[in-house]
Amino acid sequence: MLIGCLCWAQLAQQPAGNGSVEGRVINRVTQEPLRKATVRLANSGRGIQMYEASTDASGNFRIEHVPPGTYRVNVERTGFTRGLADLVGAQGRGTISVAPDQQVKDVLIPMTPHSVVTGQVTDEDNDPLQNASVQLWRLSYVGGKRQLMPSNGANTNDLGEYRLAGITPGKYYLSARKQNRDWRPGMNRRPEAGGTETDYLAVFYPDARDASTSTPLELTVGQTLNGMDLRLRKVPVSRVRGRVVNAGGSGSMVFLLSNVPGRFSTMGLRPVPVSPQDGSFEFRGVVPGSYTLVATRGGRGGTRAQGRVDISVGEGLLEGVEVQMRDPFAVNGQLAAEGVEAQSLAGVAIQLMPLESMSMVPPPVARPKEDGSFILNDALPDRYRINLQGLPEGYWVKSVRYGEQEVYETGVDLSAGPGGEFRIVAVPGAGVIDGLVRNSKGEPLPGAVVTLAPAKQFQNWTEMYRYVTADQIGVFRMAGLRPGEYRVHAWEQLEMGAHQDPEILAKFDAEGTKVEIKAGGREGVELKAIPADLVSAR
């Protein structure tokens, strides 16, 4: 019994060096305490470490036995938006540090009540549509380009009614569509009608065919928007029938991507499978316009391949479209890093990134062997640039040669297949930028966002952009920079990915600071943060 008590006492003791975090969770609007909120600390420094606690009736929480380190703080509760905690005080946005044996106290976390959108979906006769798909979309950034990404969604009930809850305040686009049963290979095609074929197409609130011409919803904290009704009407549509040459059996798919400038392609038709018997495919409910057909093959146990063709769809039926599936090939290469043993480069990832065209399959990736050689398998005919990840600290890519040509800045044309080998040279002396961010009052700004954009000739190179957060005293650091010219901005708030948007960079060019990085160079800058309301007003 004594042994059991001693063991229990030992377990109950706080491990030496560990600290604790305690605080309070409140309603951002009413300032009232929130019970049953879950607060989590996550540290991925040495594998993911998670510590959590729930708030009591007074909104208080305490997390014990927290090892020293820096943690991301997440919070969730029913009826409130979940995610990274918006900490109040000197801790910084969403991040908290715990020193050895430190008791971090008085952490205040306000939570934002979620918003709700309700309404009804009807047809052209004002009859309710059951099981219609209703979706909220939010503009996000992928590769520096604004795209609609799905947020909250639901299906309508037997009265055509829907309710979308758990919405984070912000700007959204609302859409509805009738869930039609797509044609699949092996199904009997319906006979051609004598008149024009019609179908229900997606509509954006209040009555637009595309989000770019619709009215966005501005949702504030805890707001409920009722009566967001949408009406679907049948409109003339077309069909596209064709065949994939060299489809290669089962597992091939065809995507139909709109080429209309400025149109958000998120609401395009779902991809359709290719018949394994004859390579045929069919799209129904296509709006006349300009498109790119992309056929892909890949997956478990299969050889990946891709083909594309541009088409123009008019009224009625477009048939006889052929997409040539082009088989992949392998490209050899050699990686060398000055002053580094070849076996130390085993962790480097070498990628072939398409220069212009949209690929529906992941880019080829290779890792060098002990002698620095590598093979990029599954490369497809296209124009590419080389991207390296995981180089030793302080190294940058000085040269990429393909055959006898230097191709690092210009890219390499593999449209006709392989015609040489890569020779990649990495050298030490990558640049560093250290800096401090201040607010409009000249005070250091904890948690400010700092972004780095390369010169215009590299504006499509996503790996040369940087997005970091200033620490608790407004200090930041960017390392591993390739020598060249850059522009640095500081922001009170900026959505992840927006730092690659050419429109945003152009609008706030004057607020940026030009920095020229030389080999082995270290530059220091002091920045004034761009107010969040200026960015949101763009």
Image: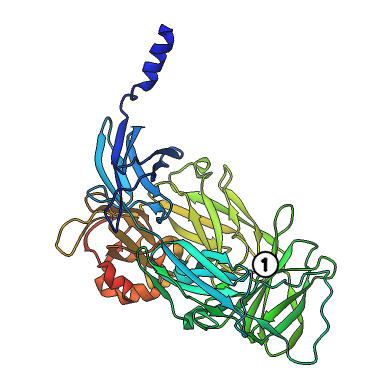
Viewer-proximal residue, 85 or 42?
A: 85
* Badge 1 density bin: few <14, some 14–19, many ≥20, Cα 10 Å: some
Q: Is residue 108 visible?
A: yes
Looking at the picture, how far across and down is residue 332, in whole percent? 63, 56
Determine whether the residue tagged by mark 1 lies in a helix, strand or loop. Answer: loop
Q: Is residue 508 left or right of residue 444?
A: right
Q: Is residue 67 visible?
A: no
Q: Is residue 76 left or right of residue 197?
A: left
Viewer-proximal residue, 267 or 344?
A: 267
Against 503, residue 519 (above or below) is above
Against 395, residue 114 (above or below) is below
Against 415, residue 493 (above or below) is above
Looking at the picture, how far across and down is residue 238, in whole percent? 70, 85
Viewer-proximal residue, 190 or 61?
A: 61
Against 115, residue 68 (above or below) is above
Looking at the picture, how far across and down is residue 353, in whole percent? 55, 63
Q: Residue at x 38, y 76 (%)?
A: 503
The single residue placed furthest to the front in the displayed view is: 159
Q: Amino acid at mark 1?
A: Gly
The image quarter in which residue 162 lies: bottom right
Q: Residue at x 25, y 67 (%)?
A: 530
Looking at the picture, how far across and down is residue 134, in whole percent? 56, 70
Location of the N terminus by quadrant is: top left
Location of the C terminus by quadrant is: bottom left
Which residue, given by chain and number where applicable, does mark 1 sit on?
417
The single residue placed furthest to the bottom in the displayed view is: 195
Viewer-proximal residue, 359 or 290?
A: 290
